[in-house]
Image (cartoon, rainbow, N blue to C red):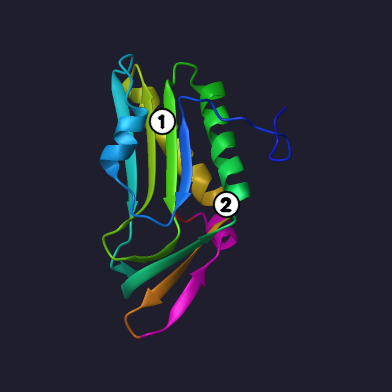
């Protein structure tokens, strides 16, 4: 059994990163695309302009990068144990201050069939949000800000 304490080596065909630089859907798509794929599913998480009807002007992300990458590797390993025909997994997340409309996370999965690609991509983003040591701070229009706790997302069952 693999745990987060066990060394997990990513496959060479996969790609994972935590970046300050803006994320590119075209770059991520190119990394996941494979001639054997009949489906590529890309999930793009973006900074929205409100949370619970309260105006948001920016989000700030921080991460413990070494452990976050290990979580990404584990997610890919879990995907391959559940869906054996997955060809590539790509997970990129931004850190720093992002404005409304900017991409904060990109997850992409390529495989021969669409149903598995959709399921695996959803598995990846859901597990990333609940397990990766990545925190976000919401900056409100009124000048205040609030850190969003990963633990609170787990307890409430919300898709934070």
Q: Is residue 52 visible?
A: no
Q: Is residue 25 left or right of residue 86?
A: left
Percent position of residue 55, x then y: 30, 75
42 shown above or below 159: above
Cα distance between the residues tagged 2 and 1: 26 Å
Q: Is residue 3 left or right of residue 124?
A: right
Residues in magenta?
143-157
Percent position of residue 88, x then y: 42, 25
- What residue does disc 1 label? 119
- In percent of the image, x 59 and y 35: which residue is there? 74
- In percent of the image, x 44 and y 40: which residue is there? 91
Q: Quadrant of the C terminus?
A: bottom left
Splitting the image into 4 quarters, where does residue 152 fall?
Answer: bottom right
- In percent of the image, x 33 and y 18: which residue is there? 113
14 shown above or below 25: above
Q: Is residue 38 visible?
A: yes
Q: Quadrant of the N terminus?
A: top right
- What residue does disc 2 label? 65
Pick the residue in front: 13 or 81: 13
Percent position of residue 62, x then y: 52, 62
User: Which SS class for mark 2?
Assistant: helix
Q: Is residue 21 left or right of residue 67?
A: left
Which circle's residue, 2 or 1, is located before the other in the chain? Answer: 2
- In percent of the image, x 31 and y 28: which residue is there? 40
Pick the residue in front: 54 or 20: 20
Q: Does 155 appear in magenta?
A: yes
């Amino acid at each position: 059994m693999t745990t987060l304490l066990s060394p997990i080596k990513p496959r060479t065909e996969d790609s994972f990163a935590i970046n300050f630089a803006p994320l590119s859907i075209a770059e991520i798509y190119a990394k996941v695309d494979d001639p054997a794929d009949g489906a590529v599913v890309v999930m793009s998480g973006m900074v929205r302009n409100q949370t619970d009807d309260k105006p948001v002007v920016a989000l700030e992300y921080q991460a413990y990068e070494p452990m976050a990458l290990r979580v990404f590797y584990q997610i890919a390993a879990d995907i391959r144990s559940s869906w054996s025909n997955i060809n590539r997994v790509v997970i990129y997340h931004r850190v720093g201050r992002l404005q409304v409309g900017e991409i904060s996370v990109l997850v992409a999965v390529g495989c021969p069939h669409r149903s598995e690609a959709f399921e695996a991509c959803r598995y990846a983003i859901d597990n990333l949000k609940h397990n990766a040591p990545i925190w976000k701070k919401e900056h409100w229009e009124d000048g205040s800000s609030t850190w969003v706790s990963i633990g609170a997302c787990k307890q409430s069952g919300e898709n934070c």
